[in-house]
Amino acid sequence: MKAVLTLVVLVVVCGGIFALGTLKQKATDKPILNVAEDVALTVNVSQPERGEITRLVQAPGDVEAVLEVDVSSEIVAKIVEMPIEEGDFVKAGDLLCRLDDSRLRAEVESGEARLAQLQAAIVQAQADEEKADRELSWQYGLYESEATSEVEIRDYRTRRDIMRAIVKQRKYELVQAEAVLRRLNEDLLKAVIRSPISGVIAKLAAKQGEVVVTGTMNNAGTVIMTISDLSRMQVRTRVDEIDIPHVTRGQIARVYLQADQNKPVPARVMRVASKGTKPVGRDVVTFETLLEVLSHDPRIKPGMSANVEIEVAKETNAITIPVEAVVHRMRKELPEQVVTDFDAKQAQLDLSERAKQAQYIKVVYIMKDEAAEVRLVDTGIADTRRVEVRDGIDLGDTVIVGPYRSLDQLKAGKKIALSDEAKKEAEKGKAAKIEKLTDDDKTEMNQEPEKVEKAASANPTP
């Protein structure tokens, strides 16, 4: 019995609410009880603009000289003279430092003596060879007169062959001694270190009186100094793998030094690495990219940190809207006509039905008659603030750009309204917007020039 009474009460209450909903006020012709009235969303709007847009790729980097040389010693010796200091400019061939060459000079004298000794030994060996030839000839004469035996002739022939071998041995030793002497003389020349290039002494790592050593497999050796040619500078950057497909040789770039972020330095892409690297402890793959600095700005020093911007794409006459206006919606959240148009544009793609249902569609909402209208858009390049729209938006449209909460709730046909602050900003910007419109833009809006002001009033832009 209680259940029946409860059901009757619910039916009566629902019927009463429905009846009140059908009743309307005589003065306003609005329902007395509006249970499901659609509350307008407060939104911010913007007007599409025609102008230049550039896509930039940003990356960190380090400034360095295109030509930089580490000067090391090729011999082990002590520095006895160093007439230059850090920061000095040197020309190719100028004296950088002089090493102690007393040991090398002694070795050269010993090598020269060894060479003279071998030359004398060759003369002696050749004389012994001639004597052995004479004795062998004398034995042949005796053998013909049967005054000697065949064994004696063989012994003299063997002695002659030994003398010839000794002569060859002494000559080979002479060649070896000459090679050793040449190496010693070259090492003696290496005791005087001269500049291989013209440039500035960027770093001086050794001092007069220190002993420098040569490099080995496990030891890099002593770097005496570093010379940098400051006439040509470059920036070595690390571009993310997402952006590297857009970076090519010859693209224009700008270098922002940490010391002065307000005055960029012009640059150009010289080389892009064909293989990426992954820094230790990070999962991001980067590609080394070299940029040539196109300025002789004295602010640029080797070793400086910098940020670079590379212009990878540019449009000079593009229709652009704020990037926050472009949203992604699931197929089921959009009108059927928008989905049909999207599928028609994607007809060349071979996708399964399941993949199609999982696709997000890129759309823009515009304000029309105080309601939201969804538009399928084809976007192009973008920068940090605006994105190019190739199709789907006209200059006369009013694009909804936020706030994010309102954009998330927007659907086709949803009632929308501008906030009071947005309306005030729209009135201020209306006059400026009319001045920016060109004759081509007015034609594209299908309006006469004298009607532009009326259009701007109808579609205010904050």
Image: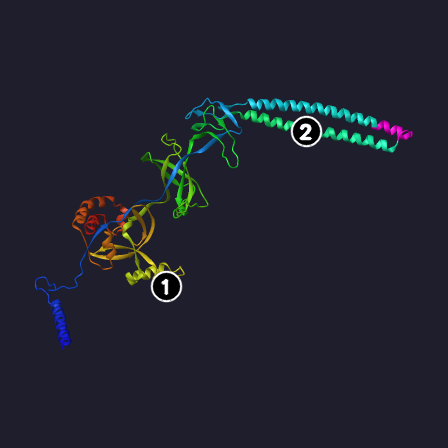
In this view, the residue in front, 201 or 367, is 201
Name the residue that disc number 2 marks: 173
Name the residue that disc number 1 marks: 354
Residue 373, magenta (yes or no): no
Which mark identifies residue 97? none
Quarter of the figure with residue 308? top left
In this view, the residue in front, 311 or 201, is 201
Q: Residue pushed farthest bottom?
A: 1
Residue 115 lies, with reference to residue 40, above or below; the image says above
Residue 40 lies, with reference to residue 161, above or below; the image says below
State the image coordinates of residue 360 (x, y, percent, origin top left): 33, 58
Give the extent of the magenta segment.
136-148
Q: Amino acid at mark 1?
A: Arg
State the image coordinates of residue 51 (x, y, percent, origin top left): 30, 45
Q: Identify the residue at image location x=79%, y=29%.
A: 160
Look at the numbered disc 1 and give the secondary structure of its residue: helix
